Amino acid sequence: MPQQAFGVELSQHEILLSDEHTEFRWVPYEDAARMLRWDSNKTALWELHERLRPFLAPDLNPGLVSIESVRLV
């Protein structure tokens, strides 16, 4: 099954979940990497983190990512 991964800046937006998802939370990159199960998701997260690294100030948080919980039916 083809997968698509996207990174978007959402600091000024309210997060609304569809019925397909049960929750989300913002976590530091390192925590998100440990929480992910599938290699394809881990790779997508790593690629996004590497692309954003030059834009992050060294004294700031290394970036927060949202982890969604998918409701299995």
Image: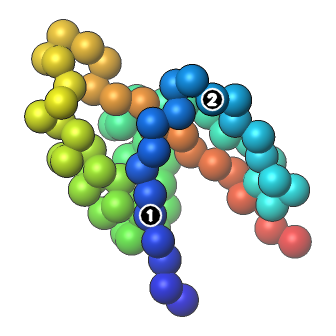
Q: Residues within 10 Å of mark 1 (few under 14, many from 20)?
A: few
The residue most toward the front is 12
Q: Is residue 6 left or right of residue 24?
A: left
* x, y percent for residue 24: 67, 39
Mark seen at residue 13: 2
Numbered-mark total: 2
* x, y percent for residue 64: 42, 30
Residue nearest the viewer, comparing 49 with 40:
49
Residue type highlighted by circle 1: Ala
Q: Quadrant of residue 1?
A: bottom right
Q: Is residue 7 above or below residue 60?
A: below
Q: Residue at x 49, y 31 (%)?
A: 27
Mark seen at residue 5: 1
Q: Residue at x 81, y 53 (%)?
A: 18
Residue type highlighted by circle 2: His
Question: Mark 1 or mark 2, which is nearer the start of the sequence?
Answer: 1
Mark seen at residue 34: none
Query: How far apart are the two marked residues, 2 and 1, measured between alpha carbons?
Result: 19 Å
Residue nearest the viewer, comparing 2 with 14:
14
Q: Is residue 63 above or below residue 2?
A: above
The way the protein has been coloured in the rendering is rainbow
